[in-house]
Image (cartoon, helix red, strand yellow):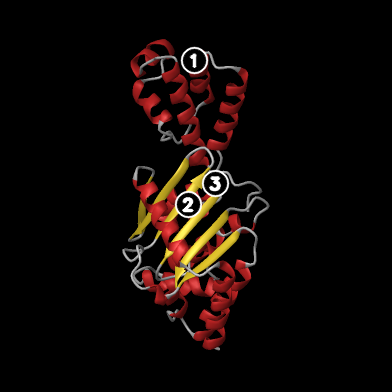
Amino acid sequence: MPESRISPPVRRLQLGMLLSRLREERGLTGPQVAEQTGVTPSALSRLERGKNSYVTPGDVRLLLDLYDADEDVREESMDLIASARATPYWAPYRRALGELEEYVSLETEARHIRYWHPLLIPGLLQTEAYAREVIAADRFNDDASLVQLKVRARLARQWIVRCDDPVNVHVVIAESALWQPIGKPAVMRGQLDHLVQTAARPNITIQVLPRAAGAHPGMAGGFVLLTLPWLGDALFIEAGSGGVVDRGPRVREYGRLLSRLQAMALPGEESAAYIAHVAEEIR
């Protein structure tokens, strides 16, 4: 796995936002930039939105010259270009990720990931056996090789939890997810034991929302909130084989919802003890 958590699509987006800010500070429009640099308005738009999958240093230098960028900005831009043109670690799993690739690109550089899941253990905390059962059940039309690739992709993503610069993860799961039979009893025991061990990591917080809590604001379904240092928060709501990434006003709404769920859930130590209790009951 890579030594640093770098996501080329995120670096393209970061570069685009930087160039957009410089252009706006100079009071220039797309057509004006095109007239003075030869970079067409459509190419500039793709570049500023992070949609240009092959960023050319030459075009960026033309823009930086026009914007009279200082040396620090130029150095930052060249570093971003180098990262933006790299091959992402998840490239071997693109067939398995499909529409999830946008989410994985954000997940890779997130500083904080907050989950609410009413039905399952979140993917970053799943064991291989548990993940295989879940994926095989959900993607029952897929052939065995694709299911296996999806399992490998899910496990590969977990490196961001264990690397030298790990992401901070805060999970709220419903009590029912702990009791939901996934595979044979040994699969669930292994998964629950893994959760208890994982909860001991300093970058992991796991809370259980007990059934006794009754009606709560998360009954509509699960979601994920990701925080990137320069991008802010993004919301991910899973849907079918992909999902919806939202960086708009709904992010704050779901942030308040998650805070409410965290307040209703058992504290971390009580949650870990209860997970261990369920594991013993399954034994």
Look at the image and tell me whether residue 85 can be seen: no
Judged from this view, the residue extending furthest toward the top is 36
Label placed on residue 109: 3
Marks 3 and 2: in contact by CB < 8 Å? no
Marks 1 and 3: in contact by CB < 8 Å? no
Mark 1, secondary structure of its residue:
loop
Mark 3, secondary structure of its residue:
helix
Q: Which of the two discs, 3 and 1, labels the residue nearer the N terminus?
A: 1
What is the x, y in percent for residue 93?
49, 56
Q: Mark 2, residues whose alpha carbon is within 10 Å: few (<14), some, or many (≥20)?
A: some
Residue occupying image coordinates x 55% and y 31%: 81
Q: Which residue is mark 2?
A: 104
Look at the image and tell me whether residue 140 can be seen: yes
Q: CA distance from mark 3 to mark 1?
A: 28 Å
Q: Does residue 47 lie above or below 255 as drawn?
A: above
Q: Amino acid at mark 2?
A: Val
Q: Which of the two discs, 2 and 3, labels the residue nearer the N terminus?
A: 2
Label placed on residue 114: none
- Which image quadrant for residue 78? top right
Label placed on residue 67: 1
Judged from this view, the residue extending furthest toward the right is 164
Mark 2, secondary structure of its residue:
helix
Q: Amino acid at mark 3?
A: Glu
Q: Amino acid at mark 1?
A: Tyr
Q: Does residue 118 lie above or below 227 as drawn?
A: below
